[in-house]
Image (tube, coloured by chain):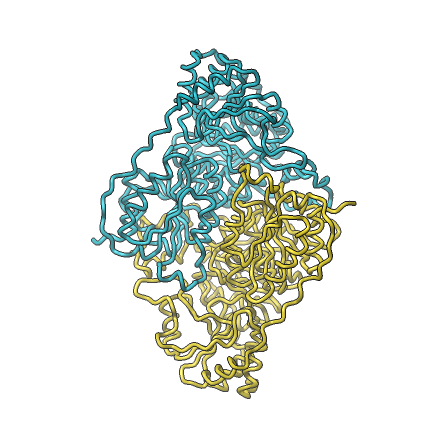
Chain colours: A cyan, B yellow
Amino acid sequence: MAQNGADILARVLARNGVDTCFANPGTTEMHLVTAFTHDLGITCHLCLFEGVATGAADGYARMARKPAATLLHLGPGLANGIANLHNARKAASPVINIVGEHAIDHIAHDAPLTADIEGLARPVSKTVTTIRETGRIDADVTDMLQEIQTGPTGVGTLIVPNDIAWDTAQQSNLPPASAPAPTPPDAEAIAAAAKALQEPGALLLLGSPHITRRAIELGNAIAAKTGASLRAEAATARTSRGGGLPEMARIPFQIDAALEALADTRHAILAGARAPVAFFAYPERPSALLPEGCAVTHLSPPEGDLEATLAALADHLDAKPVAMSAPDMPPLPRGAITPEALGAAVANALPEAAIVVDESVTNGPFLQPTCAASPAHDWLNNRGGSIGYSMPVAVGAAAACPDRPVLAVVGDGSASYTPQALWTMARAGMNVTVVILSNRRYRILATEMSRIGAGEPDERSDPLMSLDNPPIDWVAQARAYGVPGASVTDAQDLHKELTRAFTEPGPHLIEARM
Amino acid sequence: MAQNGADILARVLARNGVDTCFANPGTTEMHLVTAFTHDLGITCHLCLFEGVATGAADGYARMARKPAATLLHLGPGLANGIANLHNARKAASPVINIVGEHAIDHIAHDAPLTADIEGLARPVSKTVTTIRETGRIDADVTDMLQEIQTGPTGVGTLIVPNDIAWDTAQQSNLPPASAPAPTPPDAEAIAAAAKALQEPGALLLLGSPHITRRAIELGNAIAAKTGASLRAEAATARTSRGGGLPEMARIPFQIDAALEALADTRHAILAGARAPVAFFAYPERPSALLPEGCAVTHLSPPEGDLEATLAALADHLDAKPVAMSAPDMPPLPRGAITPEALGAAVANALPEAAIVVDESVTNGPFLQPTCAASPAHDWLNNRGGSIGYSMPVAVGAAAACPDRPVLAVVGDGSASYTPQALWTMARAGMNVTVVILSNRRYRILATEMSRIGAGEPDERSDPLMSLDNPPIDWVAQARAYGVPGASVTDAQDLHKELTRAFTEPGPHLIEARM
């Protein structure tokens, strides 16, 4: 049987180890659907909304450490996926973002769905390629897979005109993209960092791409040896923690807390981290969070090998492993679900090897710290700040790690951007537990309004921040998409429902009324 | 009290008659929220997802014939609104699309939410402006309102850095944007069209921006006088119909049907219409739908005054009003909800002055034609083809015309992109009835797959087209967002539920199992 371009493209993906696709296809992607679902071992997950597909590809990349493909329909389909591609870009997640396009000759006719796909893709992509000849498919795809996994990893948008997919094509056989060598530790940077860490007011700041358990052990050893403080960035793409490790301080989200936390820093040593900046600008507050005059040493870039760098640094300093202990597990909480009680309920219930996707917003300050007392687990933060992130990322994490329990903790405002993720969880029977923090407000806005000097929330501005009229019925939302749901108002019940959800296979939703 | 930039911006909008805003704000829009909700008579509708806000602005513009504002949060917030801005652009709907941006000095710090907002906006905007000085607010907003309502109307994206909103600013008092004069009929084009219409194989094709009742009366008079055929474009932004008017043929969506319908056309006279093109490209099919050698006369551009042009043309031709009659109302349907029965149920229930937003996709072929028998109503089609269009557009139509009943008819696949629109309908008690055509498939894909030569759907590709595992529970979805819902499998029950929904105030959702 003659092969078409879609067949070749599927083969090149498979040859390069891309075996998972999150899809919301249309007419222009039909040849790709046929090719992807036939005989190549590519697992395709249908998503009801493109933001689910792109967020899933982000979560998949963080856990599988390789790219998944998306499959999106023309410019508008891409557009619906951009917000979560933005998050993937900021997390440096490699994603091969495949977007169908009209047949090349059709584009100039300006049909209803014609749009500037490359223009839409550029702001969130490390690289954008429209395949213009069937003979280029193999090279274009292989080059893209190489590029998005090398140096600063990121999103590659591959635009496939329909005639490229349907035309007969010759198979070529380029070698697969080679596994990129991680940027090795830089001896000069290590010597400089070692010196800086021994100065007063030194801070070792850890960041991307993955703060492993060993990186935390090494960071603690280096801090103990040098007297430097140790912190992680405000949001990290992936941190392995719990299981006896101490909690690592992060840079606070709130501007004044962040400035205070860093006030005594005189030398920042950046290991996979960027110099910290304020999430938003505020009148009379700086954008750069380090104090004026603070020196900065770049130990390793975000795309570097964090663990190897810290190992070389520890070696240079002769820093030995130190005894570490986890915080105590808090008692089982009772009564109202306060932020403290939320942390305690989740920490007590979290099973070994869990993956936590954190979009807890204003109700989250105790969540991550308290779970340091839980068994070993991975924690994923949102580095891009675009909300509607956690349920899609949970879908991708579950696809990458089907045997691990996944927990998404998400504010009710945030959960309202991409609730369609629940359907894909149900369809694939994914072991994802979603906790909706239901305070029926965009509470962060009420806080931010006065913080940013826009006045106090009042009865006139309230309708642009309140979610209580009508209240969202989250159990009905779960049922709509085939997910069993429960609503709890008591922390003890929250713990009970979490334990049940982690025990039963398949997805669960728990609305925690706060 | 000193005014800030946000206050000035709100005043300029109000002075120019912009009195409605569809919003999903964040921290960077807090000053705008305060200004918009205080004392200026701007009605703000909170949306849970930005695609609802932008679609609502499109629907509002079609019915109110003036722009509403959106209020979106930074690049990712804009991104979530792009798909429905694409539809607004293709419908030439004037929209003032307001997007918050970080304070100007903060942008270079590349905070988590920093993105290329202008780059994202350009593909869907007629004009994009970032306000760079408080002294420019009045001129920038007034200029934009002028531009998006003049000539080819469209989307203006106004980017407001946070410091522009919070800085103290002086009020200026430019005159409001002047009401644009519609492009007058062109005497030469009218003479040419009059001649062409009398040739054999002549087709008078009606298009944008609004096919009014009088335009239909004039079109029929001209067709009767000249012997030309009369059609409308495949999708029109707004057509006023029913109430005794005959049904007007449209260009079919399906490629072979479209080619056949136009096969005998030897001269196309375009009145507010573009030369028709295929929705998608298909192997061995042309993109341009008019037969080769077909002559084209441009009577009036899409931004022209369609009614005045047709009146001048009728006058030139001495075409007198003709007797017209509506098709007969079909009997009340019974039994399974087939596409025919759907058309009959809706046609029988549709009240006077209804606004129908049509996203009926594969189940729709009888819907619009059958409703020609209903009382006078307006019909809105999707000119951009990006799905998830109808429920948001219905929100905007209801905001523009609170006293008119609004009906959105939408496939279950399409409805899954922007279900959050239901919440805004419930919040504002809008008189919108949503009919979900639930066949639990992307049925159009199964049809298109073989039509486009990508093979026959089989059990391997089916999981990328089927929506039955799990089935979406639409009544639960409605309940989640505070909308009463019902599910029907019988056409008689559909008619009964429609009648009830049109009688009771507030939104209703009816799942029609097909």
The residue lying toward the viewer, choosing from B86 and A116, is A116
Q: Quadrant of the C terminus of chain B?
A: bottom left
Total labels drawn: 0
Q: Is B481 drawn above or below residue A66 in the view shown?
A: below
Q: Vertical placement of A45 versus B329: above or below?
A: above
Question: Splitting the image into 4 quarters, where does residue A399 fall?
Answer: top left
**Is residue A9 visible in the rendered structure shown here?**
yes
Residue A54 screen position, x and y as percent? 44, 43
Question: Closer to the camera, B44 or A209?
Answer: A209
Which residue is situated farthest in the right direction here?
B1
Please tell me in which quadrant of the rendered image residue A116 appears: bottom left
Q: Residue furthest left?
A: A1
Using residue A61 as the reference point, say whether residue A229 is left or right of it. right
**Residue A265 % position (x, y):** 58, 21
Q: Position of residue B305 (x, y in %)?
A: 58, 73
Q: Please, is residue A336 above or below residue B315 in the view? A: above
Left or right of residue A319: residue B153: right
Residue B336 can be seen, yes or no: no
Q: Quadrant of residue B64?
A: bottom right
Q: Residue at x 66, y 67 (%)?
A: B179
* Residue B403 position (above or below residue A338): below
Q: Which is nearer the eye, B430 or A265?
A: A265
Who is closer to the viewer here, B136 or A454? B136
Q: As drawn, is B83 to the left or to the right of A179?
A: right
Q: Where residue B229 appears, x then y in whole percent?
A: 45, 80
Quadrant containing the N terminus of chain B in the rendered view:
top right
